Image (tube, rainbow, N blue to C red):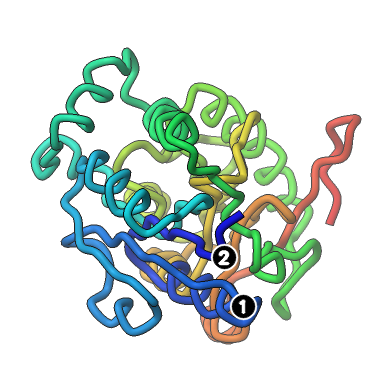
Amino acid sequence: MSNKIGIIAGGGQFPKLFARAAKEDGRRVVIVAHEGESSADLEKEADSFYWIKLGQLGKILTCFKNEGVQETVFLGTITKTRIFRDIRPDLKGLSLWNKINVKHDDSILRAIAAELENSGVRVRESTLYLKHLLFPKGILTRKKPSSHQLQDIRFAWKVARTLGGLDIGQSVVVRDKTVLAVEAIEGTDACIKRGGSLSKGKSVVVKVKKPNQDFRFDLPAIGRETIHSLADVESSVLAVEAGQSLLFDREEVVRQANKAGIVVVGIEEIPDGELVY
């Protein structure tokens, strides 16, 4: 097995954190970064670095073959609405795109992963070196959820799980057991703002994994921007599935949530379907 590990990078800090952790484990890091998504300073974290356009699967395969990469990870965000306006596939990418019947997140990512593995590149879980970033169980903030808010969380949890099962999104915004918004291609922050604007404050946001979540990609993620979005519409609660989601900048997230009076809680669903924190 090669000592190198590839990173197929989108936006955000996840690729950078992973690259540093991999190097601490003695790995050499080859980064393939997406133009318009990845940060330019990501290059400083790599032993080898390449820019690609969205859809250039053939270039990824060529880079990894030339570098001798046998393992890779998918890390960071891709603006999903770009698939309708900015995708620039090469021949390999176009061929794969035309084979995918349903253009949902999981369908696309699983198809790309299968192509990589068929080419001898194993796709590893995104938390390989960063399991400490998994969202913890319990209440993170000073405020605790009220009994009424817990009812909203339980209601929204079922809706979000169904939504995830259809591979539409991972987040739901509710108030008084009324669905105000569900996440689709626009992403979590836009969903929060859209739903929160309808509730005039006091909305509850729930974010969960998909029922058949693949830990290799697209784990639910929370960070400072999430709290900014919640505060902008005066949401009251953020409930996230513990152990199945990522939490970036924990101290700052908690500080901002406390300042805005927002409850942040990590919840686990036990085998009988009960939610515990």
Residue type at mark 1: give it.
Gly
Q: What element carries label 1?
A: loop
The numbered disc on residue 193 is none
Category of crowding for the residue at label 2, using alpha-carbon neighbours closer than 10 angstroms: few (below 14), some (14–19), many (at least 20)? few
Left or right placement of residue 159 versus residue 63 in this view: right
The residue under the point 31% across, 24% down is 103
Dot 2 or dot 1: first in sequence order is: 2
Comparing 55 with 165, the one in front is 55
Quarter of the image containing the C terminus?
A: bottom right
Rendered image quadrant of residue 68: bottom left
Mark pair 2, 1: CA separation:
8 Å
Residue at which label 2 appears = 3
| Residue 121 pos. (x, y %) | 49, 43
| Residue 119 pos. (x, y %) | 43, 34
Left or right placement of residue 82 versus residue 277 in this view: left
| Residue 193 pos. (x, y %) | 34, 56
Left or right placement of residue 197 versus residue 22 in this view: left
The numbered disc on residue 26 is 1
Q: What element carries label 2?
A: loop
Comparing 170 with 2, the one in front is 2
Quarter of the image containing the N terminus?
A: bottom right
Q: Is residue 126 above or below residue 224?
A: above
Residue type at mark 2: give it.
Asn
- Are the residues tagged 2 and 1 within 8 Å (C-beta)? yes
Q: Can residue 198 be seen in this view?
A: no
The residue under the point 52% across, 83% down is 256
